[in-house]
Image (cartoon, grey):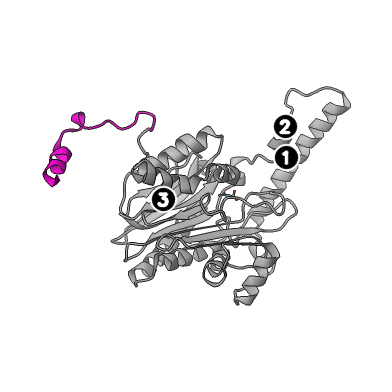
Amino acid sequence: MRFLLVLLLALPMSLSAQPDAAVPPPATAEARAVLVIHGGAGTIRRDLLDDATEASIRAALTAALEAGYAAIQSGASALDAVTTTIAILEDSPHFNAGRGAVFTADGYAELDASIMDGATGEAGAISGVRHVKNPILLAREVMFHSSHVLLSGDGAEEFALLRGLDLVPNQHFHTDARRQALDRVLQRQHEQQQSERGAADQDAVPEQAVPEWQLEHPAPWQMTGTVGAVALDQDGHLAAGTSTGGMTAKRYGRIGDSPIIGAGTFANESVGVSSTGHGEYFIRNVTAYDIAARMRYLDEPLPSAAHAVIHETLTESGGTGGVIALGADGTVAMPFNTQGMYRGYIDADGTVTVQLYDDE
Ligand code: ASP
């Protein structure tokens, strides 16, 4: 049997099965990593980032990777490494998670997060919190110290208090850049409503009529900066986590994919995934789990499964965004269909790779 396998592997490519023509080859080169992170997908272009901001974002991603790597090197579990890494990204104002989170339509930061342990299948998540300094820590508390998976709003905040987590005023999360983004969206919505009203007055439908649903359809720059991490520890276990402020000008109470296990975050014994993008599409497509399912049921390699889920399923449904995924053998996939995605990984030997744009 083993002889036959060796013989098959030795056959030239032309004699072996061709890859499925419907799935274009994955853009991401295979790497062997112990930690992969993202800092959100969206309109991320060289002409929109000045040198100082770009350097600062790359430094923040590198610092998070190095901190998570140090944890893994010192024997921490994948779950601990994910928690450490995401908490650092939450404290950076560059990302839409913790400090630097986007605003709801009524001017608050409302945060969602989740975490999953691939070794045990345990998970914890929180949504709609306004005062928890590090939402990923609360998601972890839900996992370890409650009998639930997902806590929301006041109940989640009270649980944070009981568990002794740091609580902060909502202003802690606010930044000028996110305030300006909210102002832009509200202005755009106002203009659309005015144009619809004007048309109604004239009893005519304008050529540029905007359907109601499109008022809530985000421009790509409305969804940049969610953070996520997937780690592989020295025991070969995987864990994944995601943290976000959601989408600019979302209705208060709106819950995206990030705290939904299977959509925003998933981990099992063979792959860990964290998503970023227009959450409603990731929920409907069960994006993070779909990668694991393709690997398990179709026996697809991780890069092809991740590529198909983003460039076929998500794209064909009209969704935008990307994922990071890490396999138990250290394989990395980071596909996205936006103009960029803040992303990076660190190899077992400590080599850091950080990329922002779609041509890197
Ligand atoms: N997926 C997040 C949400 O829909 C947003 C993002 O990743 O940028 O809440």
What is the crowding at mark 1: few (fewer than 14 residues within 10 Å), some, or many (at least 20)?
few
Badge 3: few (under 14), some or many (20 or more) residues near its Cα, within 10 Å? many
Query: Residue at image x 55%, y 56%?
Result: 95
Pick the quarter of the image with the C terminus: top left
Residue sitting farthest toward the front: 1
Q: Where's residue 49, x and y in %?
A: 53, 47
Residue at the spot 42% in from the left edge and 37% down from the top edge: 308
Q: Mark 2, residues whose alpha carbon is within 10 Å: few (<14), some, or many (≥20)?
A: few
In screen coordinates, is 181 left or right of 18? Answer: right
Amino acid at dot 2: Pro
Asked if the residue under mark 1 is in contact with the one under mark 3, i.e. CB atoms within 8 Å, the reply is no
The residue singled out by tag 1 in the image is 188
Q: Could you tell me residue 103's position as x and y percent? A: 68, 54
- Describe residue 109's horizontal placement relative to residue 277 as left or right: right
Residue sitting at 77 percent across and 24 percent down?
206
Using the numbered discs, state the Cα–Cα distance from disc 3 to disc 2 in whole angstroms.
35 Å
**Which three-letter amino acid code belongs to the residue tagged 1?**
Arg
- Magenta stretch encompasses residue 15: yes
- Residue 35 position, x and y percent, is 38, 59
Q: Which mark is residue 325?
A: 3
> Which of the labelled discs sits on residue 105, or is there none?
none
| Quadrant of the rendered image containing residue 5 | top left
Q: Above or below — where is 330 with respect to 209?
A: below
Q: Label 3, secondary structure: give it.
A: strand
Dot label at residue 211: 2
Q: Which residues are magenta?
A: 1-23
User: Residue 240 appears in which quarter of the rendering?
Assistant: bottom left
Q: Earlier in the sequence, mark 3 or mark 2?
A: 2
